[in-house]
Amino acid sequence: MDRGRMSRAPSSRLSELPMRVADSNRMSMVYTTPQSKQPSFGKLNIPKPQSVTSERRTSFFGARTSGAGLPRNSTLGGFGGAEKIKDVRPLHDKAFVQQCVRQLCEFLSENGFPGSVSTKMLQSPSSKEFFKMFEFIYSQLDPTFQMPTSKVEEEVPRILKDLGYPFALSKSSMYSVGAPHTWPQVLGSLIWLIDTVKVYWCMSKQELLFSDFSEDNINIEEGAEYNKLFLDYTAETYGKFMQGADTFEDEDDTYLSKLKKLYNVDEALLASMEEKHRILSDEVERLEKESQTDRLMTKRMEKVKLQTDLKKLQSYRSSLESFKADLESKASELNEELEATGHHLESLKQEQDRLQHLLQNQKFTPADVERINREKRELQQTISSLTKPLEEAEQHMWNEEIALAKVKEKAELKLVEYHKLARKLKLIPVSAKNACGNDFEIRTTSEFGPSTMVQYKAQIQKLISNVEEENSRLAMMKLSLDESIEQVNSNFLDKSNDLKQLREQIRRLDERLEHDMQELAREEQKWAAEVESVENHQKLLEKKVNHGYDDAVQQLKAAQQQYHLVLQETNEERRTVANNLASIFTTAANHLAIAEKFLEDLHSRVQRVCSKAIEEDEAALQKLREMMKTFISKANSL
């Protein structure tokens, strides 16, 4: 439902998240009756949301709790205070982050993201890739948006802040988007922006729900029945709001169904008007594109293209004819070859009949039969003697394959344990912390052979040499540290001697301190005598102060009487100013009503002019189509 069409003030809330703050600019869709407004054409108008950072304003009716089930305090309290919003999304949970990555990947893939996108790339994207994704997603809200070339790191947080994103993104996080401590928060902002785009799409698809109710564009005024529905809806939603609810989808659906019933909404008419609006929008967009280009030049370019296509078709036709001639020549050659093959087949059949006749008339002697049987038995014995070794060889091969499979299974288990341990030690992949650029991963291949073993041995030998170099470096470091320790020990002995000298000096200072304390005790006795004299002087001063206090009290009473007189005069002036402000506000309200009526009249006149312009453009378009048909027919005749 397009809330811009359901309320007098457009909603600045585009997020799908639960609303935790009462938005002063947001008016519910139930504040107005359905109005007959024509769909607007042109640039997408997205209202600028209120700036909402990590602080949010509390409700006008007092502080509210964050729990959904706790009742709200309806006592009027101070408004304008701020409380911190805590991000309750588990952005540091790997499963939640992977789910967000999949959701982002699906959205970009389904909506035609120009670059290559994959879940692997979204695990730690660069700042350049993030800005491309942000520009693509935000362009779904504002198609005219283009990412600035300078100060991009400041522009992205500002746009999110203007859209109402409730959590702050620092400027420094834009420089290292793919860092492990930064990417979850940035990913959360992209998911929030995707939810905002989906809400905007949903609102755009249903923007004609209460746009037009008849072909005559009859305005429906608010009446007693509408006021009763509105008050019932307000009372019900406010009661649930005081119980802790933030969304009122069921109440909204019920209220909309009652409004449809009250104003006799025709769903079929709405669907037809929406289709008409879509067609007109496409036509206007096409006409705007055509108006920006030279039509004659466009037609000339189309003519050149058509002539080029005609030449290509003619060349293709000539190539087809030559190909047809080649096929016919090949077909004739195949027919001749087929005839020759038929004659050869007849001669072979005659030869076969002759040999068959000789075979039937041939007679074997008993010696030939005995010799054939003897050769048959010898061949059978040879086959039986060879079958047993063959079976034994096959059984041995089967046992060897089973043993090899077991060895491979054990090797794979060891390899899995090795990879698990290497991941714990951060040795794989190559970009791991402790890998130092070495590939410690062992890959299993079906063509594992001596060359692979030689490769792994060379890699292991290289690692051993590196470890030995590191070991020698550490040994040299240990020797230098031992020398440093010896030097520190010698310094320690020197400092111990210095400490003994300092202790001797401290003892001398203690003796001197004791002597000074005795002198201070004598001075304290002198100070006690001076304090006694000062107390006597204080008592004398207190007597004089009490006398002056009585005079001040009398002056205060006179000032209070004067204050009451001035306060009474101020209250009179305040009432006069309030009456003047009330008259001014009444005059301003009347002026706004007159201005609103004038704007409605202006809108209707502009709409009539727009419809007339569309009709003229349609007539011009029809003429262009006829010219195009004539041009095409002439081009075909050429």
Image (cartoon, rainbow, N blue to C red):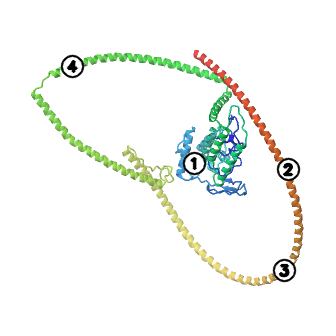
How crowded pointer 2 is (Cα within 10 Å; few <14, some 14-19, many 20+) is rated as: few
> Which residue occupies the foreground of this view, 406 or 144?
144
Give residue 546's position: percent from left, percent from top: 86, 76
N-terminal-most mark, 4 or 2: 4
Label 4: which secondary element: helix
The residue under label 2 is 580
N-terminal-most mark, 1 or 2: 1
Give residue 235's position: percent from left, percent from top: 68, 50
Label placed on residue 353: 4
Label 2: which secondary element: helix
The residue under label 1 is 178
Q: Is residue 136 left or right of residue 554?
A: left
User: Which marked residue is nearer to the observer: mark 1 or mark 2?
Assistant: 2
N-terminal-most mark, 1 or 3: 1
The residue under label 3 is 539
| Amino acid carrying mark 2 in the image | Asn
User: Which marked residue is nearer to the observer: mark 4 or mark 1?
Assistant: 4
Label 1: which secondary element: loop
Picture layout, residue 190 above or below residue 301:
below
Look at 49% across and 52% down and name the residue there: 435
